[in-house]
């Protein structure tokens, strides 16, 4: 494991944009983390699949650690995974081994470490529903710790690991059940097809820009106004994409950044997008929704600063 300098981060971003990392280290084994003296760097960032992170045009003046720890091992009903395993590869393994429980994640981009950190979810499912245990490395104590599900403090698109950035996820154990292989493949493919049909997969993007809005955050008047749009995901929410569409934000463009016509909660890269243009569109969307309904949108993506 070596530390490189001036590495272009756009090569690690699903958006295909972003400046250079001053320092960059790729880890393929948890023990690699012990070799890094984090105190030498003024800041650091852990990079996974690059599917929900907006990397600034000026890059990152610090250390970027690319988590590429890969392991897939089945032990009984427990699936032991390296944090850098791609969700796509995990789902293929589940289909091959008739493991049920992750069908909802069909088409979900990124790594399992990133999914656990942000408690990824879709189609009424969340990764927390399958997590049994998570191992992480603390950069201050330089010790590994294992936490059971209830210790991970999962919330809506959040977890202990998101709140405590000094904890780097190294491995995840999921609990799954045996099922019918054809049924598992069918339901997984349904989710993939849905995403391909409804989401702008033909352009680089980093997924849903904003979190959906919990019904409990809205006034009674707004609950009545949006009652036809309410869905469980996994609790009652108003989909942000509906508000963005109602506010006529579909297709709004700044430079090569565009609020998608297909799914307005996605901001897509039409060619040579700048992170600053994406951020301007985010500000426009937030101001528009705030002015129209008094609702504060919260980013689901992470903006690296």
Image: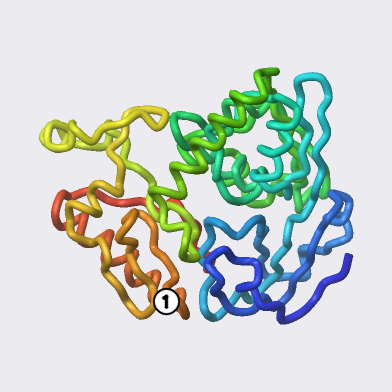
> Where is residue 208 drawn, in percent x and y?
42, 52
Number of numbered discs on residues: 1
Q: Residues within 10 Å of mark 1 (few under 14, many from 20)?
A: some
Is 162 above or below relative to 177?
below
**Picture quarter containing residue 237?**
top left
Locate the N terminus and report the quarter of the image it occupies.
Answer: bottom right
Q: Is residue 150 visible?
A: no
Relative placement, left or right, of 236 versus 56 is: left
**Picture quarter containing residue 58?**
bottom right
> Where is residue 289 drawn, in percent x and y?
21, 55
What's the residue at 38%, 52% (across, down)? 210
Relative placement, left or right, of 64 versus 154 is: right
Q: Is residue 15 visible?
A: yes
What's the residue at 47%, 80% (across, down)? 272
Along the line of sight, the residue nearer the viewer: 10 or 42 = 10
What's the image's color scheme?
rainbow
Relative placement, left or right, of 296 versus 86 is: left
> Where is residue 37 drawn, in percent x and y?
83, 64
Residue with the mark numbered 1: 276
SS type, badge 1: helix
**Picture quarter containing residue 53?**
bottom right
Is 43 above or below relative to 91?
below
What's the residue at 84%, 62% (across, down)? 36
What's the residue at 78%, 70% (across, down)? 40
Is 119 above or below relative to 267?
above
Is 185 above or below relative to 242?
above
> Where is residue 15 drawn, in percent x and y?
52, 67
């Amino acid at each position: 494991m070596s530390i490189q300098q001036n590495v272009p981060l756009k090569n690690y971003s699903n958006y295909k944009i972003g400046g250079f990392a001053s320092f960059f280290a790729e880890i393929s084994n948890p023990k690699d983390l012990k070799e890094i003296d984090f105190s030498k760097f003024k800041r650091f960032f852990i990079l996974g699949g690059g599917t929900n992170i907006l990397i600034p045009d000026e890059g990152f003046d610090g250390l970027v650690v690319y988590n590429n720890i890969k392991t897939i091992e089945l032990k009984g009903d427990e699936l032991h995974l390296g944090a850098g395993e791609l969700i796509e590869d995990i789902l293929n393994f589940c289909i091959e081994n008739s493991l049920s429980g992750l069908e909802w994640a069909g088409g979900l981009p990124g790594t399992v470490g990133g999914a656990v950190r942000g408690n990824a979810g879709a189609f009424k499912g969340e990764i927390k529903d399958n997590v049994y245990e998570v191992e992480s490395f603390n950069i201050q104590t330089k010790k590994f710790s294992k936490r059971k599900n209830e210790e991970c403090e999962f919330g809506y698109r959040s977890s202990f690991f998101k709140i405590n950035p000094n904890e780097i996820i190294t491995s995840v154990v999921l609990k799954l059940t045996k099922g019918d292989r054809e049924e598992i493949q069918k339901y997984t493919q349904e989710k993939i097809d849905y995403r391909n049909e409804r989401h702008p997969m033909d352009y680089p993007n980093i997924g849903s820009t904003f979190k959906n809005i919990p019904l409990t955050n809205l006034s009674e008047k707004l609950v009545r106004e949006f009652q036809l749009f309410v869905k469980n995901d996994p609790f009652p929410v108003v989909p942000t994409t509906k508000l963005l569409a109602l506010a006529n934000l579909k297709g709004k463009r700044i430079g090569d950044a565009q609020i998608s016509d297909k799914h307005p909660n996605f901001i897509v890269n039409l060619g040579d997008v700048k992170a600053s243009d994406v951020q301007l569109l985010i500000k426009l969307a937030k101001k528009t929704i705030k002015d129209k309904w008094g609702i504060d949108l919260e980013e689901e993506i992470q903006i690296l600063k």
